[in-house]
Image (cartoon, rainbow, N blue to C red):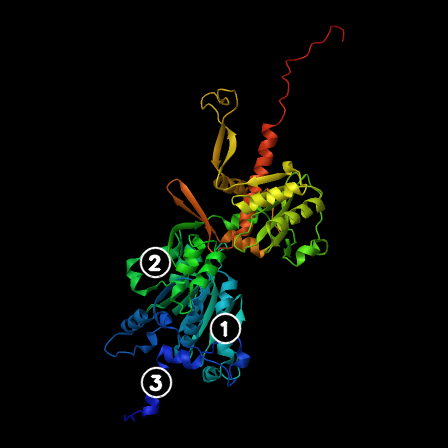
């Protein structure tokens, strides 16, 4: 068989076709979510940044070697394509994953590939742009089967097929289900892209490993370096064999990252020493941390979303502050006690107020009010307004820093009874019980006859109390995405006898408000027990004969 030599133009086309950089910069629009502008002359194409070259899939550049077996050829491609992109946020990890998925559709023959994530929301984040490229990109028209839809969303997932016979699936791992990874059954993927890999489950990962092609699979793993105890991602990063494929970059690699950006991010993530800053900005691997809350158990015991209502949410800023009567529509539910609890925002972050009613059996979370950039005096006025509107309540504030203490002082000057205000200081210890003799159980006293008290770290005690309230079915929580986000991203790390707490996202203000509430509720309960008047002992009664 005679073959004609390729022309120079054809050679250049093939060079671009097998180059991931050329294909990206020639085909991929900057605004990947706006198909209606892709055919416009003004549509700009992607220009990769230098640090993003390490995030590309170079498997397409490996030609098939007739001297090697099929599996050996694929192993070469696997070595050039595998990526464990566990790094800081906002450097283009997800964007490059979307691009690679699209290029996989172009290069794939009669085989399978898969995109997955731990829940539907994050799966859709990747699948929707890929589906748009397959549906509307003019270049992809030559890969479509005529007269049929090549993109389908079914059963909470996605399918895209091409004329050469390649099929790409989008699968939800469903890590919070009773059987994670069931949607992976029946796959034989040779390429697998994973979004937010830190949330992968053991069960789902085991099913994923069983769902790859017999020749192997090019893994493209993306996420932040949140290494939870016994997590699949921790095992992946801890395996020395994977070291050549780990890409771990901080946000500092971005060319226009300056001191102002650094300061803004430090403010956003509550300081440079916070877990959130280390994970999301520095890309540091946080080993030994684990999600504090068992979200499946928490949802069940709090009847999350079962009441058919949502948390009523209000935002108050310096404009709305002057219209509280019009903006804040609050009613006191029938209750035995009402609690107004709040963390206090600093460095421009909001103060999150939660209002909880106790009906004698359940603590019912009903209102959430966010205060944005109000002075401490203005915040004190808002707390007083809420207190009076509800006809009295216990007000608990995070007074760890001076802002909270200033608000408390202003509230007292404004006429809020001091007895109804609880100042919570997480940097101090809290009295939790009487010290007792281990043998007799009697309360120990000092030389003046005053009982000695057992103390605990206030933050640790807040978490103990929250576990009791949430896991023992004492709380009712209506539907609220912010609540789920705050609680599912709250992590703990144990170092010896010391516990450290933090948030993967840096947004834990609502969670902090519940910590404040838990201390307020405990102190109220403990005060009732310790101040309860002692009843006189009854030694019996005597009746006169004949009575």
* Neighbourhood count class around disc 1 (C-alpha, 10 Å): few under 14, some 14–19, many 20 upward: many
Q: What percent of the width, then of the height, locates residue 38?
A: 51, 81
Q: Residue at x 63, y 47 (%)?
A: 380
Mark 2 sits on what residue? 237
Task: Identify the secondary structure beneath mark 3.
Answer: helix
Disc on the earlier residue, 1 or 2 = 1
Q: Locate residue 396 relative to residue 112 in the image: left or right.
A: right
Mark 3 sits on what residue? 14
Disc number for residue 292: none
Disc number for residue 129: 1
Vertical order, 397 against 279 (above or below): above
Residue 52 placement: quadrant: bottom left
Which residue of the protein is positioned furthest toward the right in this rendering? 546
Task: Identify the secondary structure beneath mark 1.
Answer: helix
User: Does residue 97 appear in this view?
Assistant: yes
Q: CA distance from mark 1 to mark 2?
A: 28 Å
Q: CA distance from mark 2 to mark 3?
A: 36 Å
């Amino acid at each position: 068989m005679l073959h004609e030599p390729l022309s120079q133009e054809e050679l250049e086309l093939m060079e671009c076709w097998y180059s991931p950089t050329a294909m990206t910069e020639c085909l991929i629009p900057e605004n990947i979510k706006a198909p209606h502008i892709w055919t416009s002359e003004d549509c700009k194409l992607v220009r990769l940044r230098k640090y993003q070259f390490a995030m590309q899939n170079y498997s397409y550049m490996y030609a098939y070697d007739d001297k090697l077996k099929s599996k050996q050829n694929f192993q070469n491609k696997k070595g050039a394509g595998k990526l464990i992109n566990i790094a800081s946020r906002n450097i283009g990890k997800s964007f490059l994953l979307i691009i690679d998925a699209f290029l996989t559709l172009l290069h794939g023959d009669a085989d399978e590939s898969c995109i997955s994530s731990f829940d539907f929301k994050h799966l859709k984040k990747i699948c929707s742009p890929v589906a748009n490229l397959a549906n509307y990109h003019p270049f992809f028209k030559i890969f479509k089967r005529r007269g049929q839809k090549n993109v389908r969303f079914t059963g909470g997932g996605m399918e895209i097929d091409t004329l050469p016979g390649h099929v790409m699936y989008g699968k939800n791992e469903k890590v919070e289900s009773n059987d994670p990874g069931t949607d992976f059954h029946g796959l034989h993927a040779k390429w697998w892209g994973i979004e937010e890999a830190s949330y992968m489950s053991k069960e789902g990962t085991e099913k994923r490993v069983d769902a790859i092609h017999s020749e192997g699979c090019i893994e493209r793993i993306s996420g932040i370096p949140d290494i939870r105890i016994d997590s699949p991602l921790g095992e992946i990063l801890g395996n020395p064999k994977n070291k050549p494929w780990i890409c771990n970059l901080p946000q500092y690699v971005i060319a226009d990252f300056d001191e102002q950006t650094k300061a803004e991010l430090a403010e956003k993530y509550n300081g440079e020493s916070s877990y959130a800053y280390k994970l999301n900005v520095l890309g540091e691997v946080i080993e030994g941390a684990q999600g504090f809350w068992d979200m499946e158990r928490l949802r069940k015991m709090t009847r999350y979303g079962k009441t058919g209502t949502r948390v009523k949410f209000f935002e108050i800023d310096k404009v709305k502050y002057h219209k509280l009567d019009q903006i804040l529509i609050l009613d006191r539910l029938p209750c035995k006690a009402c609690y107004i609890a709040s963390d206090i925002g600093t460095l421009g972050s909001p103060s999150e107020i939660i209002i909880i009613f106790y009906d004698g059996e359940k603590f019912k979370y009903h209102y959430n009010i966010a205060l944005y950039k109000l002075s401490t005096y203005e915040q004190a006025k808002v707390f007083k307004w809420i207190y009076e509107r509800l006809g009295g309540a216990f007000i608990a504030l995070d007074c760890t820093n001076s802002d909270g203490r200033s608000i408390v002082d202003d509230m007292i000057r404004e006429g809020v009874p001091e007895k109804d205000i609880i100042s919570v200081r997480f940097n101090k210890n809290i009295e939790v019980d009487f010290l007792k003799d281990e043998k007799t159980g009697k309360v120990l006293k000092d030389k003046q006859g005053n009982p000695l008290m057992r103390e605990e770290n206030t933050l640790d005690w807040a978490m103990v109390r929250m576990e009791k309230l949430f896991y023992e079915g004492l709380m009712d929580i209506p539907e609220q995405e912010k609540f789920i986000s705050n609680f599912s991203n709250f992590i703990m790390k144990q170092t010896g006898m010391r516990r450290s707490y933090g948030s993967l996202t840096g947004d834990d203000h609502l969670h902090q408000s519940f910590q404040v509430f838990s201390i307020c509720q405990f102190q109220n309960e403990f005060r009732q027990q310790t101040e309860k008047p002692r009843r006189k002992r009854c030694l019996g009664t005597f009746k006169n004969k004949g009575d």
